[in-house]
Image (spheres, grey):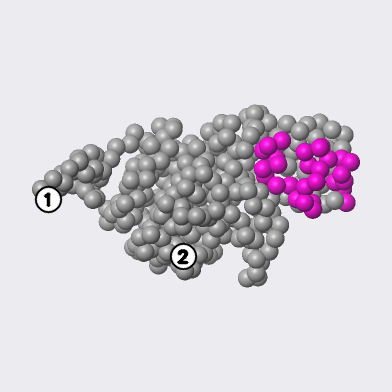
């Protein structure tokens, strides 16, 4: 049973627990949903973004912030999210990610990690942001027009700001291709020998960070390669940043399948919730694959994927959850990118569970309510 009340114009949400049902009298224990977690929302101070202050868009952004304050409860006390509106974004309606990447350079990918590493909480097995950003297309959502679907788009981009997709680590994530003509087996540290083709996959990087860093930043071969290929130089810079934070172990490891054309999410919390609400015997959640000219392609490096591939749930026409909802309308499915008119989006528990897989503490209970219930206007 879902219970809410209005106090001083604000909606208060309650958890309900059945305590007795004797003599056809049903008694519930009602407790308010409380969280000490805070989303510190900031609108960027610039001429375009300032037009949105005091509009329904700022109201919806605050609604989204309050929603995440309820479903995320820790482990840190707050996250700062800076939001901007901008023109010239072409067909991109919104973008989000850790640090200020979304404000300056577009969708975040792991290859840009050195630029935002100071905005991350990093432990032996998790990596999540305490400072993030989102940017929205001012040509699509004009400040003097009201497009209700923006509310759902904002939830979607805030998920990326919390690290969904942006900070995933799996066998399907390829950082770069290294031409074998300049990088031969005798130059490779032992941990890289035997890798398929000419690919450098993220898990190998994070699991063997010391060996990689020593090779690219200390050896004669690494120095020579840096002079030959600027890409190697950037790779070396990233390794230095990671080494400074003593990363080791399987950081945010969510996928053990090597295919980029059929990537699979196997993170513990997300998959457990998916089994409860969608498919009891599921071995994975399908991630949106790498596609070129409408066809699935293999071994596509992350920097070439364009911000949709490998960082969203796949289009899953025909799959229905136990509540009768089509997964095509799930808030982090790739289909939300295809129409600003979507008003029936919902969030699956596995999506929230994926945040737990990268280190956040979450509360699933409020997902019993439709997302529209947290929208004040």
- Foreground residue, 214 or 55? 214
- Image point 38% across, 59% down: which residue? 322
Which of these two is toward me, 204 or 311? 204
Question: Which element is circle 1 on?
Answer: helix
Residue 254 drawn in magenta: no
Label 2: which secondary element: loop
* Disc marking residue 24: 1
Q: CA distance from mark 2 to mark 1?
A: 38 Å
Towards the viewer: 342 or 187? 187
Left or right: residue 283 compared with residue 174? left
Q: Residue at x 55, y 53 (%)?
A: 283
Q: Which mark is residue 319?
A: 2
Quadrant position of residue 153:
bottom left
Q: Quadrant of the C terminus?
A: bottom left
Residue depicted at 57% across the width and 41% down the height: 252
Q: First in sequence, mark 2 or 1: give its number.
A: 1
Query: Could you say where residue 188 lies in the image, as x and y percent from the top left?
Result: 83, 40
10 Å neighbourhood of mark 2: few (<14), some, or many (≥20)? some
**In the image, 211: left or right of 270?**
right
Residue found 63% across the figure and 48% down from its top: 256
Residue 118, by quadrant, is: top right
Camera sees residue 191: yes
Camera-near label (2 vs 1) is 1
- Residue 155 location in percent, x, y? 41, 52
Residue 277, percent across and down? 41, 54
Horizontal side of 203 relative to 281 (left or right) equals: right
Q: Which residues are magenta?
A: 181-208
- Is residue 190 shown in magenta? yes
């Amino acid at each position: 049973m879902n219970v809410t009340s209005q106090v001083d114009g604000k909606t208060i949400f309650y958890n309900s627990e059945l305590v007795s049902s004797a003599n056809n009298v049903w008694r519930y224990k009602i407790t308010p949903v409380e969280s000490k977690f805070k989303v510190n929302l900031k609108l960027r101070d610039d001429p375009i973004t300032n037009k949105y202050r005091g509009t329904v868009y700022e109201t919806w952004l605050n609604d989204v912030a309050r929603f995440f304050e309820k479903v995320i409860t820790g482990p840190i006390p707050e996250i700062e999210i800076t939001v901007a509106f901008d023109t010239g974004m072409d067909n991109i309606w919104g973008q989000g990610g850790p640090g200020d990447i979304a404000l300056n350079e577009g969708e975040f990918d792991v290859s840009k990690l050195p630029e935002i590493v100071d905005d991350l909480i990093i432990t032996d097995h998790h990596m999540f942001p305490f400072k993030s950003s989102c940017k929205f297309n001012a040509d699509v959502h004009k400040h003097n027009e009201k497009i209700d679907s923006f509310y759902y788009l904002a939830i979607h981009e805030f998920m990326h700001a919390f690290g969904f997709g942006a900070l995933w680590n799996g066998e399907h994530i390829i950082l770069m291709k290294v031409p074998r003509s300049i990088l031969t087996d005798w130059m490779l540290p032992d941990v890289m020998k035997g890798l398929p083709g000419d690919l450098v996959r993220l898990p190998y990087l994070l699991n063997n960070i010391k060996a990689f860093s020593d090779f690219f930043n200390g050896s004669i071969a690494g120095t020579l390669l840096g002079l030959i290929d600027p890409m190697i130089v950037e790779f070396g810079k990233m390794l230095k940043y990671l080494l400074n934070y003593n990363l080791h172990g399987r950081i945010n490891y969510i996928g053990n399948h090597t295919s980029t054309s059929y990537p699979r999410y196997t993170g513990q919390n997300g998959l457990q919730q998916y089994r409860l609400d969608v498919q009891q015997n599921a071995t994975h959640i399908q991630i949106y694959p790498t596609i070129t000219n409408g066809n699935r392609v293999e071994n596509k490096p992350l920097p070439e994927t364009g911000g949709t591939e490998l960082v969203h749930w796949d289009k899953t026409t025909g799959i229905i959850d136990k509540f009768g909802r089509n997964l095509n309308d799930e808030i982090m499915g790739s289909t939300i990118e295809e129409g600003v008119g979507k008003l029936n989006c919902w969030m699956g528990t596995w999506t929230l569970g994926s945040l737990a897989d990268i280190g956040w503490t979450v509360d699933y209970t409020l997902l019993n309510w439709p997302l529209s219930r947290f929208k004040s206007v």
